[in-house]
Image: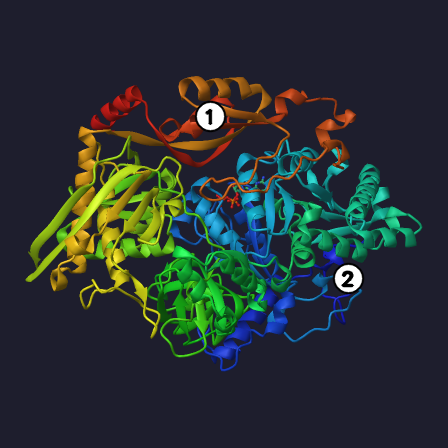
Amino acid sequence: MVAAPLLRRPQAGWKSVGSTLYTTRAGSVRSALQVKIAQLTGGHPRFFSTAVSRWQTDTLDRTRNIGIIAHIDAGKTTTTERMLFYSGFTRRIGDVDEGSTVTDFLPAERARGITIQSAAITFHWPPGEGADGQQVDRDPNLPRSAVSHTINLIDTPGHADFTFEVLRSLRILDGAVCILDGVAGVEAQTEQVWHQASTYNIPRIIYVNKLDRDGAAFGRTVREVSSRLAVYPAVCQIPWFDGGNGAFVGVADAVNLQGLRYKAGDDGRSVKMLNLEQLETEEPSLAQELRRARIALVELLSEKDDAIVEEFFECDEDHLAVSPKSIIDSLRRCVLDQSTRVIPVFAGASFRNMGVQPLLDSVVNLLPSPPESPDPEVSIGGVTGGLRRLLSGDLILEQNEKSAASVKGKKKKKASALTDPKDAISKLQSCALAFKVVNDPKRGVLVYVRVYSGSLDRNSLLFNTNLHLSERAPRLLKMYANDAVEVDSIPAGHIGVVVGLKHARTGDTLLSYAGNKPTPPEPLTSLQLRPINVPPPVFFTSVEPHSLSEEKRMHETLALLLREDPSLHVSMDEESGQTLLSGMGELHLEIARDRLINDLKAKASMGHIEISYRETVLGASNAITKTFDREVAGRRGKAGCTAIIEPIDGRDISDAADEDTLLAETVEGNQILIRAPGLQVEHSSRNDEEVSPFLPPGLDLSSLRAALQNGALAALARGPQFTFPMHNTRTTLILNPEEHLFGNDTTTSALSAAARQATSAALRDLLAGAGTVMMEPVMNVIISVDEASLGSVVHDISSSRGGHIISLDEEVPLSATDASGTPTDDNPPPIDPKRIYAPPDPFETPSVGVEIPVSVSRPRTITAKVPLKEMVGYLKHLRSLTAGRGTFVMSVDRFENMSAPRQKAVLAELRGGF
Ligand SMILES: Nc1nc2c(ncn2[C@@H]2O[C@H](COP(=O)(O)OP(=O)(O)OP(=O)(O)O)[C@@H](O)[C@H]2O)c(=O)[nH]1
């Protein structure tokens, strides 16, 4: 038996394997890091410049960009804090309940004990210099966790209101740890975030936490993993309950065939390790279960991985004789090849400091390095595909074939722009995704980037393909939670921070390219990494500055908030002059209020949070023409425009486009079509610019398009009958050059005003004709309850809340949805639970005597569509119906027309105050 503390640094290199590796003396490693920083900074601990980048690409193999995903309160922050402690990053363990954690560093997060912002933190595991250290020739006989790796950890938020934030953090990860609460098991939110991770093909491992709590059921959770997430759980550890049904004291490791017993109340650095024989003496039933777990593990792997079958035969078909290294390698192959659907499962209780070091070993051993991760999806020139395929030339070749087949009419321009895409691609120097914008009180606005190709260098010109502008990257940083180290470049596969960008927002793609042109060559200008569908906002609130003099600053602060979180929207109600802020949930707007007023110190106040209703048309308007003719700021402006409004009725906008179409776009649920018959647009042979004999000098076609579109959008922001924004409408603007253009008098502001007036008049015209109706957001709601409360919850949803029950599913996993709630094609076939190995839970062993009736604890999932209005404050009600156990998640399904009585009732309520 090995006495505690057994975990020591092996003498020459790391000799131990797997979870025996978690040697750490937190204090000493931390000081090594500090010494390193101090040496490089000449004694100044925080910032320094290095002449040579230490981020060499050959370190990529020892880099992991991972995230932790889970439902709220599963223990992400608690586990992260332990990871930082064992890696030597922190000297003491932070506590979410005390508000002293490293990762949740916004004051609003600390106060609420939940994670709102994704913070990226870099640490090393096993403790050492990570990938920045000397190049190491890896001993093929040892697992990867034998050498120090660099782990970039992105902490993702767990609340459903932050779906968009979860998605944008997910898309930069190469791998993820999914934390489950060992008492609650797989919850609705776990399923949601799990499927979101599936949309980005992120390799995952599972950690079942909180096994110290009463009612913890590891076995049941494992079975739920198979039934609800539709994957094969590869049980790598089983929990160790003292004497079989006593306190949780550690884990038994089916890979290394050993027991790890932690000292109660300790910081978790002292672990007693027992091999199988020792375990046999100390805890015979656990030893027996461990053998079963090992057999099941080898069996499962051999179904999916041929290499382990060979090894198994070489070991005379003895499951226990297969080496831990072979099992780790096999698990790794399965995790990286997601078609196997094998997910390794680990056990622990982070709060009790049990199980976190072996989990870290598994992060290093099983999750991919950046080059091993799935090819990141890009869209470019209308096609989507992998970035690596694009860079190798495969993707564009496909595009050429496609476009060659459709060279006519409106597609002509696209095809000609793509004539030599290979040349353009070869000019690409680096491609990065801004995944987080944070306003740091000391350092200013920090833009977190993940670099996907090439190397992002200091002072390079970055073209933002979302905003279509360029800006320089004056300073680059590598972040260690709240510490920062200045660097000269950020190579592919790494995460870093650009300081000093004025425009880049969360989610923007940034490119650097060869040549001195202000914009990169086509089609690079349209290159976007893993674009996200932003769902429509469903709640709004007004924001008022305390005084007129505060107004400018309030708008600047709002602009910053929008850079941080593009799922927030700001609009102006032209009639009332109010600024409206809309978002995806009540909590989302409450946090925005906290950020705006408490953190960013805007002197403003916010009104009530209200549901964002919409208005739509019931038929087509007449064609209405308006001519704007007025002097604006000392200059005459004259322009005309005709508008027609009609319902979309499920029609695709591209079908309506022909050669007279200048623009066909869907913006915030409305289609805008601009037609200009007779404008005679041609491409100049000199610079491929669009020209027309009717355009006055100084007015180009793209400004004309933008002016007309902005005019229509301004009018659509306010419905003619109920003043809610219009939705589901098609606005066709017709510009007749002979009638609507007036030489030099036709300015962009005159065009915009004419389009706004014509659109508003067409909307008003509808009131005398087909009319308009209110629309309300209807949510996709997924509720997890136990069998006992199923009946009352279903009754409440369908009778009191006007919802429609879609399914009562227990075994069939939910299909994945993206941020907008659109189902994706990830819908794997269910797994037969009988084929799944799971150890018995303490209450299942006959010796315990108290059998909990299965029907009471069986989790059930209700999927329903319910109007958002009926879901306000639902959590409290659900808790009371389910004795506190029910949880739910929801996402916007769509806006639906309201019936006349419902519209009347809602309007009466709104007039009386919400
Ligand atoms: N008993 C027990 N409690 C735990 C364990 N891990 C976390 N907790 C508690 O569970 C609560 C939630 O933990 P967090 O770490 O904040 O969970 P989280 O997933 O980060 O939550 P969000 O940031 O809100 O998404 C806290 O009160 C923790 O102390 C555990 O292993 N055992």
**Three-letter amino acid code at disc 2?**
Ser
Q: Is residue 687 left or right of residue 316?
A: left
Q: Is residue 622 left or right of residue 373?
A: left
Q: Nearer the viewer, residue 154 or 537?
A: 537
Q: How many marks?
A: 2
The residue positioned 22% from the left and 40% from the top of the image is 718
Residues tagged 2 and 1 counted as in contact (Cβ below 8 A): no
Q: From where the camera sits, is residue 488 visible?
A: yes
Residue for badge 1: 878
Instruction: Name the residue at 62% across, 71% down.
Output: 59
Q: Please tell me whether mark 2 or mark 1 is closer to you in this view.
A: 1
Which residue does the image show at 20% across and 62% down from the upper left?
694
Task: Locate residue 459, reporting x and y percent.
Answer: 41, 76
| SS under mark 2 | loop
User: Disc 1 residue type?
Assistant: Leu
Residue 358 appears in the rendering: no
Choose top left, top right, bottom left or bottom right for residue 58.
bottom right
Q: Disc 2 versus disc 1: distance between alpha carbons? A: 50 Å
Which residue does the numbered mark 2 point to in the structure image? 16
Q: Position of residue 127 (x, y in %)?
A: 64, 64
Nearer to the camera, 173 or 237: 173
Q: Residue furthest right?
A: 316
